[in-house]
Image (cartoon, rainbow, N blue to C red):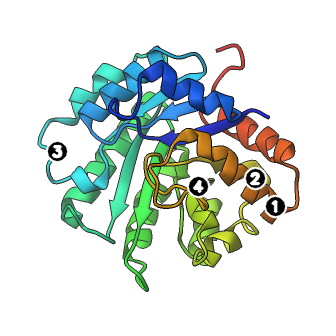
Amino acid sequence: MELFDTHFHYYPEDAAVKDYAEKARRAGVRYLLATGANLLESRIARDFANQNADCWFSAGVHPHGADAFKEDISIFQEFIKEPKMLAIGEVGLDYFYENSDRVSQKKVFSAFSEMALDNKFPLIVHCRDKNDSEEAYSDSYGILADFSRKGGSFVLHCFTGTDEWCRKFLDLGAFISVGGIVTFPKAANVRQLLKIIPDDRLLLETDSPYLAPVPHRGKRNHPEYLAVVAKYVAGQKGVTEDELAGFTTANAFKFFKIRRDC
């Protein structure tokens, strides 16, 4: 079994780079994508990827930090020619916490979407709304519909939206990534989404160090726990863990345009 954790955040205080990656591999998680949520984290993600085989990275600004991002987006051009750079992100909209004002969030999201188009990178998208609200999904859809129409591809990471919004984003060509939330007792809506997401659009992630799956909930998450997520998802879908690992890893290679000889 060779799993691909398509979204985690590496913090040097957790473990040395090599030890962190090796711990994941011992659990069957061979492939890793370190996700950047600001300029510093993007640089850390790049360094992590450059020190490990079968590891890559992305660079972006999380919506929580959108209004604090005062630099010109061109500063992120330093990553564009990096051989292990696979995507722009994590970017998007978060109206659940609204740590940044909505105008700033949409401005940053749109700017990075244009950067992704200009450089032919897929987007890793964060989209979260308040309970019983659809404004973040609606605003994200507006940006992503235009992005998709221009030839862009994107994944909704750790998606917890409704069936209706899931179908709308799938109609734009979205990939959907599922993580530890799917194991939470109150996450019946996410388990329902597994019935909607086509097998060839499903990705797996941990979003480490956040959202550790049951029975590790409350602990600091790690890519090794992707094996727990995979076992649970396989059970929900009625396939073997090897089958699930096979098609989700193939999906990740396709989505991120990774050559098998990389």
Q: Which quadrant, please, contains the C terminus?
A: top right
The numbered disc on residue 179 is 4
Task: Find disc 1 in the rendering and name its residue.
Answer: 235
Which of label 4 and label 2 is nearer to you? Answer: 2
The percent coordinates of residue 111 (x first, y second) are 29, 45
How far from the left and from the top, in percent, is residue 26?
67, 29
Amino acid tagged 3: Phe
Q: What element carries label 2?
A: helix
| Quarter of the rendering occupied by the N terminus | top right
- Report the residue marked by disc 3: 69
Nearer the N terminus, badge 4 or badge 3?
3
Nearest to the eye among marks 4 and 3: give it: 4
* Residue 32 in sight from this viewpoint: yes
- Reply above or below: 55 against 108: above
Q: What element carries label 4?
A: loop
Mark 1–mark 2 distance (CA, rounded to whole Å): 6 Å
Badge 1 vs badge 2, beta-carbon distance below 8 Å: yes
